[in-house]
Image (tube, grey):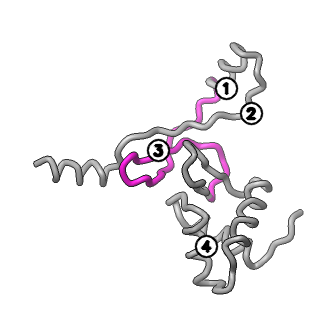
Amino acid sequence: MPKRTRQKEAILRVLKSTTSHPTADWIYSDVRKEIPNISLGTVYRNLKLLWQSGEISEMDFSGTFSRFDGNPDNHYHFRCERCGRVFDVDEPVNKETDDRVAQKTGFKIFYHRLEFRGLCRECQESREVRTK
């Protein structure tokens, strides 16, 4: 069992308290409120350890900055093309897709990730205001 440090607990607490899927820099800024002398390197190391232990998930779609999720269970996401925010999608993961692809390819599928893209409600509303 990996050692539980004050830094790791603070990082996990920050991730579990938000649904915003923050970057490491955002997490670092928030954790510094509690632990002012924490380094960005410590945040990155602990995020890696938390990910390796299955306590958090990391999203690294499309080569952008990685974002972290306090919910390690496989679930779908929506990314706004304008503001870049990431939202959880409350939709059950379709495990039949894994089975179908495994059968067609012979691959051993553990899981799949799905990310929807478009405009969030706020960006849609601001776009409507500008076009009127």
Q: Could you tell me which secondary element the residue under label 1 belongs to?
A: helix
Q: Which mark is residue 78?
A: 3
Q: Give me the C-alpha separation between circle 2 and circle 4.
A: 31 Å
Residue at the limit of the structure toward the left, as seen here = 132
Disc 1 + disc 2, Cβ < 8 Å = yes
Q: Give me the C-alpha separation between circle 2 and circle 3.
A: 21 Å
For the point 64% across and 43% down, the residue is 74
**Which residue in the protein does label 2 denote?**
110
Q: Which range of residues does the magenta coloring cover?
A: 70-96
Q: Could you tell me which secondary element the residue under label 2 belongs to?
A: loop
Q: Which mark is residue 28?
A: 4
Q: Which mark is residue 98?
A: 1
Q: Amino acid at mark 4?
A: Tyr
Q: Give me the C-alpha separation between circle 3 and circle 4.
A: 24 Å
Q: Give me the C-alpha separation between circle 1 and circle 2.
A: 8 Å
Residues packed near mark 2 inside 10 Å, few (<14), some (14 to 19) or many (20 plus): few
Left or right, 74 with respect to 8, comes to left
Q: Could you tell me which secondary element the residue under label 4 belongs to?
A: helix
Q: Amino acid at mark 2?
A: Phe
